[in-house]
């Protein structure tokens, strides 16, 4: 129960779509979504494969709770070898697409090969076919989704697609569903584009069954009550979204700005959640409303509208309508990291990311790195096509975002991501990231646990693999000091294992601001066959983490890649509570390896692999 017990295998080279039984032996070990998709991927591809070659595969997967009555049970993941990073990529998205996939009677779709021409996949319950996509190739995500719905005369079809960025090979292109929900990081959209796959459109009406309905509804209702009564999930996120963090993180001295040269941004309040609520001179607000993904009782999504008179909308009247608004990471990357405090400009740039399928975190971080090189004279006006790329230039942000989305001019260079861009101009040390993926919005000199989180993340620098900010800043589930290293190895491991388990369920990680596995395990246990106790869920998470690690090691990564840029390790924070501090990764990493059951080189020992059933 809960599993549909079926997957769809799409061979793009031959144009065939075939269903096959889900491997239930694997499902009982890896559950679903991130875990089960990773298992299929590691079994079916060579870890050394070129991410853009036909031999790489891309898997869209739901969890067993996806499509059920559980709160936030609309998540799905895209798993592949990432083009941006070269490590295993698993990018998570909300909206309504995951629910539709599950209700079509499928747990996952495995895409293999490469189509000789642009196509999209249409699924209508048990019927699946590849359809010519020439009319949509070159179109935005928005036009593609609207066009497919109109073509099939069904407004209830759910669509996940790539924009121009994925078509032209931007290395951090994402996959966007429901107009502004995205599997955004690690370049999964570039992989989709390399396969000439424009979109996946689904209409599903089959429903989802659970193992013990009465027990499940009781567990679900208990969980929803906890979410509603929690100040973060019941009040903070619905009101301000993740943007509630902008001023908080700035005040504690952990908001990176000017490509991590500083840890506090003087313009943070201008681009905060509070600023989005502020009434403009014309009586309007940037924030129109909040919104929710399928089944979500938190509703943290932002819906925003740009000021009509702003310079960024002179030639783009479509942006006068409301669209997906700023989240904290997006506002930081497009704003604070680039030294920009123009709320309308960064909202507009974020709209472009939604429209054309760009990861705003990598985009903003790459622009910030380019701005630093521009101010140093490494990048010139001749390189940028006359665009003044100094920190704080809001108009330049918008121009470069447009060019990157189209793969034109200096936008082609930005589309490389900051690691390749900085290396191209001989300043590789200015790439602020790990394993080729850029940092999100937390400076680990001010939040020590996040440094270990970034260094050891299996998909490159990422906050959604171990959000120690919850403990170190917000005091969830208990408060720890962000400026100390003691105990952080255990904290990071615990967050990593628990997060992997939550991802495998098909739930949103934001539930864990209120829930622990004590709240989640009963829901899984009632929905699925087998024993899904808290201990079983923790072991599941640990198994997933070590399997992903094995893939990366086989791909050629080593313990030497578990590190941070020199700027974070050597250059002390200049202001705030962390003034004079660097990240002390060297104190945390050996203990982390030991707790993981890995050797000194960061390799899982045979005892660890055997205990987890990985050999």
Image (tube, rainbow, N blue to C red):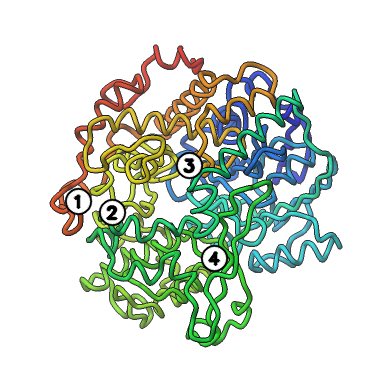
Secondary structure of residue under mark 1: loop
Marks 1 and 4 sit apart, C-alpha to C-alpha, by 31 Å
Residue under the image location 40 percent in, 29 percent down: 494
Q: Could you say where residue 563 lies in the image, as x and y percent from the top left?
A: 27, 40
Residue 562 versus residue 309: which sits nearer the camera? Answer: 309
Compared to residue 272, the image places residue 15 above or below, namely above
**Disc 4 vs disc 2: Cβ atoms closer than 8 Å?**
no
| Residue sitting nearer the eye, 328 or 71 | 71
- Quadrant of res 72: top right
Q: Name the residue carrying label 2.
A: 254
Task: Estimate the x, y position of residue 398 in percent, counting from the top left.
Answer: 45, 76
User: Which of marks 1 and 3 precedes in the sequence?
Assistant: 3
- Mark nearer the viewer, 3 or 1: 3
Which residue was labeled with disc 1? 578
Label 1: few (<14), some (14–19) or many (≥20) C-alpha neighbours in 10 Å = many
Give the numbered dot on residue 195. none
- The local crowd at label 4, few if under 14, some if 14 to 19, many if 20 or more residues have their Cα within 10 Å, is many
- Circle nearer the N terminus (4, 3): 4
Q: Which residue is mark 4?
A: 325
Q: Give the numbered dot on residue 513.
A: 3
């Amino acid at each position: 129960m809960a599993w549909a017990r079926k997957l769809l295998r799409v061979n793009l080279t031959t144009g065939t779509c075939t269903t096959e039984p889900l491997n239930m032996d694997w499902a009982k070990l890896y559950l679903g979504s991130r875990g089960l998709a990773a298992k299929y991927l590691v079994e079916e591809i060579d870890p050394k494969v070129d991410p853009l070659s036909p031999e790489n595969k891309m898997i869209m997967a739901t969890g067993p709770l996806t499509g059920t009555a559980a709160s936030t049970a609309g998540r799905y993941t895209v798993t592949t070898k990432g083009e941006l990073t070269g490590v295993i990529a698993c990018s998570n998205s909300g909206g309504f697409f995951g629910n539709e996939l599950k209700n079509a009677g499928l747990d996952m779709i495995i895409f293999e090969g490469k189509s000789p021409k642009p196509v999209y996949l249409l699924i209508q319950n048990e019927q699946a076919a590849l359809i010519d996509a020439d009319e949509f190739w070159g179109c935005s995500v928005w036009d593609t989704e609207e066009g497919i719905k109109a073509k099939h005369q069904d407004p209830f079809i759910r669509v996940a697609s790539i924009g121009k960025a994925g078509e032209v090979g931007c290395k951090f292109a994402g996959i966007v569903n429901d107009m502004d929900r995205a599997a955004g990081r690690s370049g999964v959209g570039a992989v989709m584009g390399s396969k000439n796959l424009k979109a996946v459109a689904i209409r599903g009406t089959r429903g989802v069954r659970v193992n013990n309905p009465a027990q499940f509804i009781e567990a679900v209702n208990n969980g929803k009550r906890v979410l509603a009564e929690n100040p973060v999930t019941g009040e903070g996120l619905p009101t301000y979204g993740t943007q509630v963090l902008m001023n908080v993180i700035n005040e504690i001295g952990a908001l990176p700005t000017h490509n991590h040269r500083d840890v506090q941004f003087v313009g943070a309040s201008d681009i905060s959640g509070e600023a989005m609520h502020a009434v403009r001179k014309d009586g309007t607000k940037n924030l129109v409303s909040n919104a929710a993904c399928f089944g979500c009782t938190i509703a943290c999504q932002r819906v925003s509208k740009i000021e009509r008179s702003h310079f960024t909308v002179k030639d783009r009247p479509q942006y006068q309508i409301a669209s997906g608004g700023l989240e904290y990471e997006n506002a930081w990357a497009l704003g604070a990291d680039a030294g920009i405090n123009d709320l309308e400009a960064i909202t507009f740039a974020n709209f472009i990311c939604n429209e054309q399928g760009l990861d705003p975190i990598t985009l903003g971080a790459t622009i910030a790195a380019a701005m630093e090189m521009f101010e140093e004279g490494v990048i010139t006006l001749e390189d940028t096509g006359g665009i003044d790329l100094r920190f704080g230039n809001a108009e330049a942000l918008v121009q470069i975002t447009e060019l990157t989305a189209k793969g034109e001019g200096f936008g082609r260079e930005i589309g490389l991501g900051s690691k390749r861009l900085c290396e191209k101009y001989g300043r590789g040390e200015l790439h602020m990231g790990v394993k080729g993926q850029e940092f999100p919005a937390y400076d680990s000199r001010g939040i020590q646990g996040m440094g270990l989180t970034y260094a050891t993340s299996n998909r490159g620098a990422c906050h959604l693999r171990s959000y120690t900010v919850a403990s170190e800043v917000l005091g969830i589930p208990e408060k720890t000091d962000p400026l100390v290293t003691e105990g952080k190895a255990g904290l990071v491991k615990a967050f990593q294992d628990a997060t992997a388990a939550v991802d495998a369920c098909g739930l949103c990680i934001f539930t864990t601001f209120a829930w622990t596995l004590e709240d989640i395990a009963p829901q899984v246990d009632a929905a699925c066959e087998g024993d899904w106790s808290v201990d079983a869920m923790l072991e599941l998470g640990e198994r997933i983490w070590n399997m992903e690690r094995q893939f990366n090691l086989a791909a050629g990564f080593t313990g030497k890649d578990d590190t941070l840029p020199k700027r974070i390790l050597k250059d002390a924070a200049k202001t705030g509570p962390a003034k004079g501090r660097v990240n002390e990764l060297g104190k945390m990493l050996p203990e982390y390896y030991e707790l993981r059951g890995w050797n000194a080189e960061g390799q899982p020992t045979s005892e660890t692999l055997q205990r987890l059933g990985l050999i």
